[in-house]
Amino acid sequence: MDFQTARQRVEELRRLIEEHNYRYYVLDQPVISDREYDALMQELIALEEAYPELLTPDSPSQRVGGAPREDFNPVRHPEVLLSLNDAFNEGDLLDFDRRVREITGGEVSYLIEPKIDGLTVALTYIDGAFSLGATRGDGQVGEEVTANLRTIPVLPLRLRQPLPHLVVRGEVYMPKAAFARLNAEREEAGEPLFANPRNAAAGSLRQLDPKVTAGRSLSLFVYQVISVTGAHVTTQAEALELMAGLGLPVNPYRFLAPDIRAVLAEIKNWTAERRAALPYEIDGLVIKVNDLALYPVLGATAKAPRWAVAYKFPAEQATTRVEGIILRVGRTGVLTPTAILTPVRLAGTTVSRATLHNEDYIQEKDIRIGDTVVIQKAGDIIPEVVEVLPEHRTGAEEVFNMPEKCPACGAAVVRPPGEAAHRCTGGLACPAQVLEGIIHFASRGAMDIQGLGPAIVAQLLEAGLIRDAADLYYLQKEDLLKLERFGEQSASNLIAAIAAAKDRPLERLLFGLGIRHVGERAARTLASHFGSLEKLIAASEEELTSLPDIGPRIAESIREFFAEPRNLAVLEKLKKAGVRMEAERAAAPAGPLSGKTFVITGTLPGLTRQEAEELITRAGGKVSSSVSKKTDYVVVGEKPGSKYTRARELGVPVIDVDGLKQLLRQ
Ligand SMILES: NC(=O)c1ccc[n+]([C@@H]2O[C@H](COP(=O)([O-])OP(=O)(O)OC[C@H]3O[C@@H](n4cnc5c(N)ncnc54)[C@H](O)[C@@H]3O)[C@@H](O)[C@H]2O)c1
Ligand SMILES: [Zn+2]
């Protein structure tokens, strides 16, 4: 590959990975499997190694996770929370061990722990009381989720021993049974399914309403002491024991290996059956240097420590038969083929479908109806076809061809030049596209209408109650009561949820309209630049393309969208219904604490009460004298009073002076 081609590919990979990071870490809704994601990342790393001049510090290969969600309070971590480097085979593990011994200059013993498939949290205990909990975020700044964490039954609110200060790192996860239950409920309600237990755990913990988290059966294992006063540990094994002794949940499995050979031998004991028998998902094993004194010697890269590595289990595979291929017509008219399989057990679930993406994919793998195929799944709901086993062919297999007419509306199907997808040309006359468009409009990243899933949208369309997304806002409770499945309560709830979705930020509306190529990122850019829908409609192609993230292709499809009278009619109806079409204006006294209400209790070390209040108000915050549900934080000093107890009862986040200073620094 020449330099020019390499550079283009590196740029393309970074763009792709950023987009997948956003879907995975911020929305908890990945669209590709972890295997596919890992392959993109490995390709990027290999290119950056081959062409070091292409390596930049902002490359996703050099960074941890994704940006924290903005609707949570940011928490700056006292120590960066890093990710782990991956090892996919014995060779990778031997390389890891060689690097460790090169730096430390001797034999090293390792502690093996299960790699729980959940999301990282950092937990702070002050004087033995749980006082702050945060997600990893981008490693530097996470999201404050103290109140949500309090709802996890195994998380102790008090330690068995009141150490003055303890920060630990752990993994919040969703047990397999709870995951299966949650997805079954979501399917029933017509809501999008979570791809795997990790996304389900992340989506459940990062809820603005802790009551939702409480209903999700989350659990926790802690595995690292980040800092401690009042106790001392010298090995990772001791750290686990200390935490267990304090009443924190620590995984029962750990294995002390005197050297890397013992690690390789122990890994073999982890069979698929053993993993399947665990009540939670593990996606590998973490191998850590046991002697903590070596950690500062080994150090870390910007992304991961050198004293640990994540060994990832190979994907599980199964062999089955393709019984048929069906097509789904998406929101933009794309026809997506799906293989219907003879049901087969794979990685603990029964699988009967596999995604086939598009015609090229089917042709490249030469997948025919009747073929015997190998499928695989790596923690995901929808598995993929790895390969066809041609030796099983009988000659009766049928080659699949994309249809010439849309199966939903009969309009012509075309494959635009340069695209992999086939599309229905029926537009707003195609019921499948209208259905998917409204589902998208109501979805979580868009207008987020709670309880309005695919099944209900389909029902409303069939009953002729709606023809487009704007009609939702004109629904009456009486209309719903006539429908099967709706009762007094559920009808009122849906009407209220639709009304509540009138005031979503402009960028959500723009994304929800389903303009081709306008994803969440482009929608954010457009909303913040134009500030209103009216201005965007009036914008010229030049003005559009002058914006970051908006290329000629996006600009053209925006212009096309607003040139279509049927789209303008929908917008007019939305406006009449009172849907917000302007961006939010900035609140008056801007500062890191704008809009936040604080209550102070106890004597604050190093600050008088008046000084603390001034700090808060100058940063845009408010100080109130009593704790209520509206309080955002209670700042606790020495000898706190009843306000502290009240805060705990209400689940209001409790911080100390350092926590306050951290908030001020953001
Ligand atoms: N499908 C997608 O679109 C997509 C997008 C982004 C990321 N991903 C997936 O996420 C991975 C990257 O996520 P990541 O940065 O969290 O890395 P990771 O999941 O590969 O490993 C690091 C994490 O392991 C966890 N962990 C669990 N048990 C542990 C233990 N005993 N000790 C230490 N850590 C433990 C920690 O939370 C730590 O942050 C990718 O490899 C990919 O599989 C997928
Ligand atoms: Zn159609």
Image: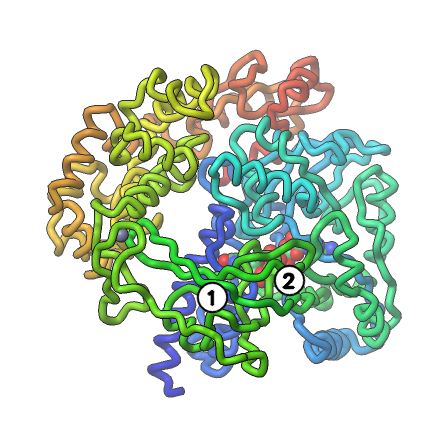
Residue 467 position in % (x across, y down): 25, 34
Crowd around label 1: few <14 · some 14–19 · many ≥20 (10 Å): few
**Residue drawn 43% across the image and 25% down it:** 484
Of 293 and 420, which appears nearest the observer? Answer: 420
Q: Is mark 1 within 8 Å of ligand 1?
A: no
Type of amino acid at the residue the image marks with label 2: Leu
- x 85%, y 33%: residue: 160
Residue 462 position within the rendered picture, expressed as x and y whole percent measured from the top left: 32, 34
Q: Quadrant of the N terminus?
A: bottom left
| Secondary structure found at label 2 | loop
Q: Residue furthest bottom?
A: 2
What is the three-letter code of the residue carrying label 1? Pro
Quarter for ligand 1?
bottom right
The crowd level at tag 2 (other Cα within 10 Å; few <14, some 14-19, many 20+) is some
**Mark 2 highlights which residue?**
84
Q: Say which label, 1 or 2, has the lower sequence index.
A: 1
For residue 202, what is the image quadrant? top right
Q: Please tell me whether mark 1 or mark 2 is closer to you in this view.
A: 2
Question: For disc 2, does the CB lie below 8 Å from ligand 1?
Answer: yes
Horizontal side, residue 385 vs residue 538: left or right = right
Q: CA distance from mark 1 to mark 2?
A: 17 Å
Q: Is residue 145 depicted above or below 641 in this figure?
A: below
Which mark, residue 213? none
Q: Which residue is found at the position 54% from the left and 20% from the top?
A: 631
- Relative to 211, is 515 above or below? below
